[in-house]
Image (spheres, rainbow, N blue to C red):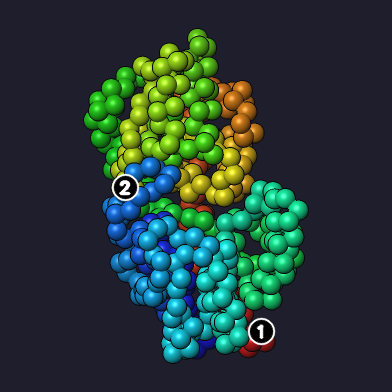
Amino acid sequence: MNRKIRLAYLVSHPIQYQAPLLRQIAADPDIDLTVFFCSDISTRKHVDEGFGQVIEWDTPLLDGYKHVFLKAYGDNGPPSVTRPVNSGLARALKEGQFDALWVHGYMRLYHMISMFRARMMGVVVLNRDEAWELSAARGPIKNFIKKILFFCLRRICHGWLVIGSANKDYYLAHGMKEETIFPMPYTVDNQYFRDQALAASANQDALRAELNLEPDRPVILYASKFMERKRPKDLVEAVARLAKDPKNRQPYLVMVGDGEQRAALEKQVLKLGIERSVRFTGFRNQSELPSFYSLCDVFVLPSLLEPWGLVVNEVMTAGRAVVASDQVGAVFDLIRDGENGYVFPAGDVDALTKSLSQIVSDPERAEKMGHRSLEIIENWGFREDIEGLKSGLNYFLSKDQR
């Protein structure tokens, strides 16, 4: 096009991972971006059910890009399929003469209505969602509803911005055409986390002293919510098994986060007799996390049904080995088994223990894996996001596609 593409982005609420990307898109000379939010919940103190406490993000969520909070009714809790009830986007699309609408997710009723109305107005509609194969594990009735949903989506959306290879395979399996799919990988601000981790590396002695860690023992890190789906108990069990094996360098387990399983995990640690090797730090805000990434030798995400796991991206920018379950969406694109970490079957504590043993028992291997993580993540960032977004926009806005 011989002018900037006027792009509207609809998302439920300001998301800390997305804010840096939105700033990058807004700075692109080819795109005029306006973001429309359904809720402002994340900009104020709010109860995060996963962490089980009131939190307030310490990174800027709204700086550097144009944004509008849509009129909202019932905005008194986390956004859901039907809440809040919003209005105003269709009028804004018409008055602003937008060329395209990019929508995050398709399971909110207002998102579906907005995509349908935009399509009827002649606006190009692109959708980006986290779904992959494990999202399809439903009963017959829900699968039937899902088929109807995708039948409608194929007629409403022009194209799909996929976060990774598993996400792409999912769309292909549900009838989306290859030529309508464009890569827009799930990313974090790689440069920010890399810079913060490098800065933190100079203060590792202070953090080790704060956590009372002996200098020559390896550190295994968990940084996520303490909830059953994340399987933190599997990791505690694996560390206990490592502690019993004299061939291993005895590791510390640092657990960053909080949630419903905190008390149960503390009891498990005591029962297994590894309290001297485990540290609970409580919830730490986003700006504090790079210090822990820099501290560890290996990071572990043992989750079930994890759509992606952006914390994997963050740790890789610090140049660390990663071990994750095969139900973490990020592993299909970011973990090369045996190169920068290991992938193990979710829930298999024996396999998790073996993977960790191979890393903590060999400092040289851990270092090589960390270097490989850096190499991989360098090609999975905002540059690739913007290239994929612009490819999709240009494809559908070109003369022969309109």
Badge nearest the viewer, 1 or 2? 2
Q: Which residue is mark 1?
A: 401
* Amino acid type indicated by mark 1: Gln
Residue 315, image x, y percentages:
44, 42
Q: How many marks?
A: 2
Secondary structure of residue under mark 1: helix
Q: Quadrant of residue 120?
A: bottom right
Residue 80, image x, y percentages:
49, 60
Considering the image in quadrants, where does the C terminus appear? bottom right
Residue 327, image x, y percentages:
61, 42
Q: Residue furthest front?
A: 74
User: Residue 54: which disc?
Assistant: 2
The 10 Å Cα crowd at callout 1, few under 14, some 14 to 19, many 20 or more, is few
Q: Is residue 96 above or below residue 195?
A: below
* Lateral position of residue 214 relative to residue 303, left or right: left
In front of the other: 256 or 212: 256
In front of the other: 338 or 13: 13
Whether residue 322 can be seen here? no
Q: Residue furthest top?
A: 246
Closer to the N terminus: mark 1 or mark 2? 2
Residue ID at (54%, 28%): 234
Whether residue 305 can be seen here? yes
Q: Is residue 240 above or below residue 288?
A: above
* Lateral position of residue 200 relative to residue 170, left or right: left
Q: Is residue 306 above or below residue 117?
A: above
* Amino acid type indicated by mark 2: Val
Label 1 and label 2: CA atoms lie apart by: 48 Å
Q: Quadrant of residue 158?
A: bottom right
Residue ID at (32%, 32%): 281
Secondary structure of residue under mark 2: strand
